[in-house]
Each structure stands twice: as C-alpha cells, then as structure tokens.
Image: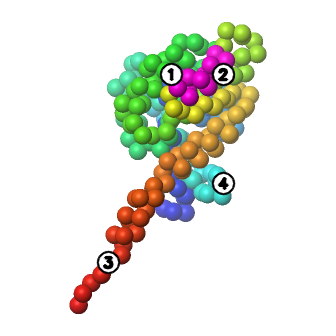
C-alpha cells in the first residue's frame, strides 16, 4: 500500500447478530442510517481519514455474528489492528455473549490486539429501563482490560468518536516499543573493514 494513502489500519467489528455492527459501519462511512436489516456474511469497507494530523487508510471489516458463520468469521482476524466488540444495550444476551463468547474467541485468536467494547443502540435506553447501564458495561470492560465506548448509529451519537478512538488505539499499538527501535537502529549501524 502506498504511503500517500496513509497508514493502513485494519478494524474488525464483532458481536452477536442484530447488535448494530453493520449499521454503525454504514452510518459512519455513508452518513446514512440503513432502515432495512440485511444479515451480514462478510463485508469490507474502506475510508481515508485524518486523525490528529495523520493520514490513515482505514479498512473496516464487518463480520457475521450468527452461529452459522463461526467457521468463516476467524478468516477476518489475521493482521487486525483493533477489534470493536459490539453488544446492544437493550439485549442482555448480547452483553453476556460479549463477555463469555466473543472476548474469549478474540483473545484465543489474537492475544495482543486491542479490543474496544462498544455498547450500541444507546438511543433505546430512554424507552427501556431494562437496558444494560453504562456503569455496568464500563465495569465489565475494565475487568477484561478493555476500553468501553457507546454509540447510536440511528441518532449518530458517539459514532465519529468511536472510530476516531479506535484508530488512535490502533496507531498506539502499532508503534514499535523503544527496545525494538533501538535494536533496529543498532542493526542499521555496521562497520566494514577494507
């Protein structure tokens, strides 16, 4: 990939079916909320963005949450820079699955890739007091060592902030640590006796 396109970042969304993964991606990339539900098998989107003055070529990978696709889904995991693990705040089962199914699957596949847990459909909280509350979800994310963010694709609340923070997180994790940098610099220094 050419440098003019910016730093490549691969972002994969994961979670139960119907939790808002595709709607978040489509609303973010097109600015329009899709009214019809179409189950995802596997989709890719791309966006060229600038975050904190840095050009980024953001590859967005949508995965199917349905059990039928559990063999296909891991094919999207290699070379991922950041995962967005979605649950819908109005679906308690998706919240439980985020902890007991999806998080362990991601940690087994790629242990050191950052995961941001995302509570979606927060616009539904105002109409339903049975929704997962922000404090509970934040506590769960903290226990798993993950960051927690919320959004509503329908009302476009927190959507840009979510993807911007995901890119920042990916960029931070891509930076080589100081020891790696020093090792590389030492390898570049060589002497030749003639």
Query: Which tag, 4 or 2, sits closer to the chain's start?
Result: 4
Q: How is the image coloured?
A: rainbow
Location of residue 110 in the rendering, given as x and y in whole percent from the top left corner:
39, 37
Query: Which tag, 3 or 1, sits closer to the chain's start?
Result: 1
Does dot 2 land on a helix, a strand or a loop?
helix
Characterize the local packing of mark 3: few (<14), some (14-19) or many (20 or more) Cα atoms within 10 angstroms: few
Disc 4: which residue: 52
Disc 1: which residue: 98
Depth order, front residue of 39/72: 72
Characterize the local packing of mark 4: few (<14), some (14-19) or many (20 or more) Cα atoms within 10 angstroms: few
Mainly helix, strand or loop, the magenta region? Answer: helix
Q: Is residue 167 left or right of residue 101?
A: right
In front of the other: label 3 or label 1?
3
Characterize the local packing of mark 1: few (<14), some (14-19) or many (20 or more) Cα atoms within 10 angstroms: many
Whether residue 83 is visible to the viewer of this picture, yes or no, is: yes
Tell me where the magenta segment starts and ends, as one range.
Answer: 132-143
- The quarter of the picture where residue 29 lies is top right
Residue 180 higher or lower than 121, as above or below: below
Q: Is residue 100 left or right of residue 22?
A: left
Query: Which tag, 1 or 2, sits closer to the chain's start?
Result: 1
In front of the other: label 1 or label 2?
2
Query: Which tag, 4 or 3, sits closer to the chain's start?
Result: 4
Query: Which tag, 2 or 3, sits closer to the chain's start?
Result: 2
Kindly check if marks 4 and 1 are in contact, taking CB atoms under 8 A apart as contact. Answer: no
C-alpha distance separating marks 2 and 3: 55 Å
Disc 2: which residue: 135
Location of residue 188 in the rendering, given as x and y in whole percent from the top left corner:
36, 72
Disc 3: which residue: 190
C-alpha distance separating marks 1 and 2: 16 Å
Location of residue 56 in the rendering, given as x and y in whole percent from the top left corner:
57, 53
Does dot 1 land on a helix, a strand or a loop?
helix
């Amino acid at each position: 990939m050419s440098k003019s396109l910016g730093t490549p970042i691969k972002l994969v969304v994961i979670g139960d079916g119907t939790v808002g993964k595709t709607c978040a991606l489509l609303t973010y990339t097109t600015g329009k909320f899709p009214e019809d539900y179409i189950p995802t098998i596997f989709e890719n989107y791309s966006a060229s963005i600038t975050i904190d003055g840095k050009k980024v070529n953001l590859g967005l990978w949508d995965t199917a949450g349905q059990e039928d696709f559990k063999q296909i889904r891991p094919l999207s995991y290699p070379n991922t820079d950041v995962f967005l693990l979605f649950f819908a705040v109005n679906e308690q089962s998706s919240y439980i699955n985020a902890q007991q199914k999806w998080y362990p699957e991601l940690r087994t596949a790629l242990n050191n890739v950052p995961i941001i847990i995302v509570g979606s459909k927060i616009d539904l909280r105002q109409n339903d007091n049975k929704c997962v509350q922000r404090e509970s979800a934040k506590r769960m994310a903290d226990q798993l060592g993950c960051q927690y963010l919320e959004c509503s694709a329908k009302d476009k609340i927190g959507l840009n902030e979510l993807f911007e923070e995901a890119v920042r997180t990916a960029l931070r994790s891509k930076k080589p640590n100081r020891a790696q940098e020093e090792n590389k610099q030492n390898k570049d220094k060589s002497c030749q006796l003639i």
